[in-house]
Image: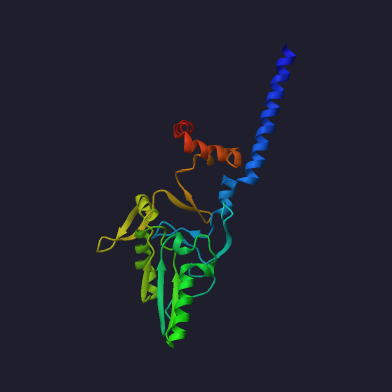
Amino acid sequence: VKRLLIFSLFVGFFSLVISLLGGEFIVRHLDPQPTFEQSLKEGLSIFASSEIVPFTVASSQNSIHLGYTREFNHKVATNSLGLRGARELEKQKPEGTFRILVIGDSMTFGWGVEDDETFSSVLERNLKAAAAKAGIQKKFEVINAGFNGGFTIDGFYSWLVNKGFKMKPDLVLVSFFPYNDVSDLLEMEWKKTDDLGLPTAVTSVDTMVKRGRLARRHPTEWKYVIPGIRNSHLFMLLGSALEKYSPAAVELIKKP
């Protein structure tokens, strides 16, 4: 009886291990999940700390942005001014140029697209083509300052009054996304204000720059906190299912 019990336990344990390994293999290849290791690879490493905004874009960067959904895999470059794209721009506006400065968050920066596919790049090409067709001699320049002022409107203002307006733009376009541009305001603190009571130095209580990447001071992804299995595609899938169908169970797991 003792041998039979030991044998049964061994078979049960072995079967469990095989099942877990098989499940991991299937999920990894058929429905890959955003594991901790994958999230580090995907995260853009082009950010820098700042005294006036929660974070900004570092200068002269070359990075690969990999989407965990495999939807995109593209290069991201910044110039010496910390602006999207490898093309260098003069800080002082060239003579005879109509300069447009575009500021916003990831949508402006160009999440998921190449440097020349951002809407700022498309706008500049269209303006140049229209000007050439109409015989207009004035040059058009569209500057993509996405992420330079962090990721919400108070940081945009702080960056503009401290740095952006020094570029002497003829027009400033602010891209505002009503969803996360509003919710992101909740984590902001105004360290300095101007005579109008508007922010000239903004910091975040939750977001920081760590080795060129954006990180949370207080982790919100509980699945990434558990060592050993945070790089398991199977565990990530099961964890997502728990979040969807049994949030009470997730809260119990989070407590310890």
Whether 70 is drawn above or below 119: the answer is: above
- Vertical order, 250 against 188 (above or below): above
In depth, the one of 206 and 24 nearer the eye is 24
From this view, report whether residue 161 is shown above or below residue 152: below
x%, y% of residue 86?
54, 71
Which is more toward the observer, 253 or 33? Answer: 33
Q: What percent of the width, then of the height, locates residue 254?
A: 47, 34
Q: Is residue 27 left or right of residue 169?
A: right
Q: Which image quarter holds the N terminus?
A: top right
Vertical placement of residue 15 versus 116, above or below: above
Q: Residue at x 44, y 79 (%)?
A: 140
* Extreme-left residue of the structure: 196
Task: Indicate the colouring scheme.
Answer: rainbow
Q: Residue at x 44, y 78 (%)?
A: 127
Label count reads 0
Left or right, residue 195 beside residue 137: left
What residue is at 56 percent from the left and 49 percent from the top?
A: 39
Q: Residue at x 72, y 12 (%)?
A: 2
Q: Is residue 225 visible?
A: no
Can I make out residue 59 in this image? yes
**Position in image of residue 225 (x %, y %):** 52, 39
* Viewer-closest of 36 and 61: 36
Residue 80 at x, y percent in the picture? 51, 70
